[in-house]
Image: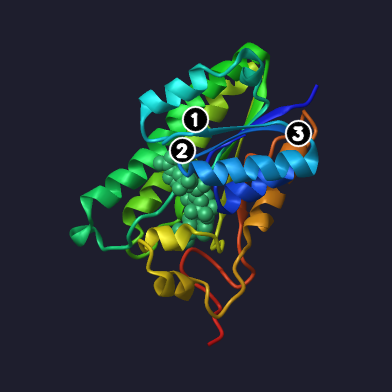
Amino acid sequence: MKKIALVTGATSGIGEATAGLLAQEGYNLIITGRRTSRLTELSKKLEKEFNVTILPLSFDVRFLGEVEKYLLNLPEEWKKINVLVNNAGLAVGQNPLNTGIYDDWERMIDTNVKGLLYVSRIVSDFMIANGGGHIINLCSIAGKEVYPNGNVYCATKHAVDALTKAMRIDLLPYNIKVSQICPGAVETEFSQVRFKGDLDRAAEVYKGFVPLKALDVADAIMYMIKCPPHVNINDMVIMPAAQANSSIFNKKR
Ligand code: NDP
Ligand code: 8X3
């Protein structure tokens, strides 16, 4: 029987790349995100390419009612989730705290913290019923350090760091591994979202150095997933070689 993985935020970037590698590895997949057409396209592509079954679920992780509607009502066979990749997340804006935009704050807190909690609450319960599993949380270098104007995004990722540690303790008796990956700069749609569609500003983030690609992070996630049952990677910080910490880069102009 094929294993099942659930990847949140699979419509682009790290989530999409991870879904691709999991399908290649023979996992049947539940993929989620808000952009339905992208989920449909990805499902068709992966099913055709890798002979796996994909269940695309379009919902917004910020809303508990939606998360419950889709996950609690999964067909029984799809509740046997072996791997959960809590990837859906975003940064919105980059203002100093005193000029912060409340709506940006709500979007980040609701998605990165509450969304991750809602999904984890339900799926960890399924995993307990199934006798075990593996949860991988997308944290960030922003969950280890803060940087100028990163305030609320950094706070949400520090919350993910804390929740990863807490989940590992709470789920330890149930044969559920909890891992976390903390990337530096990865060139995805992340900066386009952060800068609200300002493509020039987004591109500027990755100029003058070679950023990570989504596939680099997906490869590292697969390494965690493929570890033998007695081994867990608790935490992994993965950076572009040209990035020393959250704000110091070796940029060539
Ligand atoms: P992308 O913007 O490319 O992908 C983000 C994904 O999250 C999309 O699939 C998006 O789907 C989904 N998403 C966002 N908000 C919601 C929501 N409310 N409900 C459901 N899905 C949502 O960015 P990345 O791939 O770079 O980001 C993935 C994760 O990696 C995030 O948690 C991010 O914080 C983290 N990260 C990214 C880094 C980077 O430099 N890029 C570095 C470190 C960590 P849709 O819009 O269709 O809903
Ligand atoms: C995304 C990377 O450095 O912009 O988590 O916070 S950073």
Which amino acid lies under the numbered mark 3 shown in the image of this protein? Val
Q: Is residue 138 left or right of residue 131?
A: left
Q: Is residue 175 above or below residue 156?
A: above
Q: Residue at x 43, y 21 (%)?
A: 68
Q: Residue at x 47, y 58 (%)?
A: 190
User: Which of the labelled discs sits on residue 97, or is there none?
Assistant: none
Q: Nearer the viewer, residue 223 or 40?
A: 40
Which amino acid lies under the numbered mark 2 shown in the image of this protein? Ala
| Residue 141 visible in rendering | no
Which residue, given by chain and number where applicable, does mark 3 sit on? 52
Q: Nearer the viewer, residue 144 or 90?
A: 90
Q: Is residue 104 above or below residue 135?
A: below
Residue 85, image x, y percentages: 59, 37
Which residue, given by chain and number where applicable, does mark 1 sit on? 166
Which amino acid lies under the numbered mark 1 shown in the image of this protein? Ala
Which residue, given by chain and number where applicable, does mark 2 sit on? 162
Q: Label 2 near label 1: C-beta < 8 Å?
A: yes
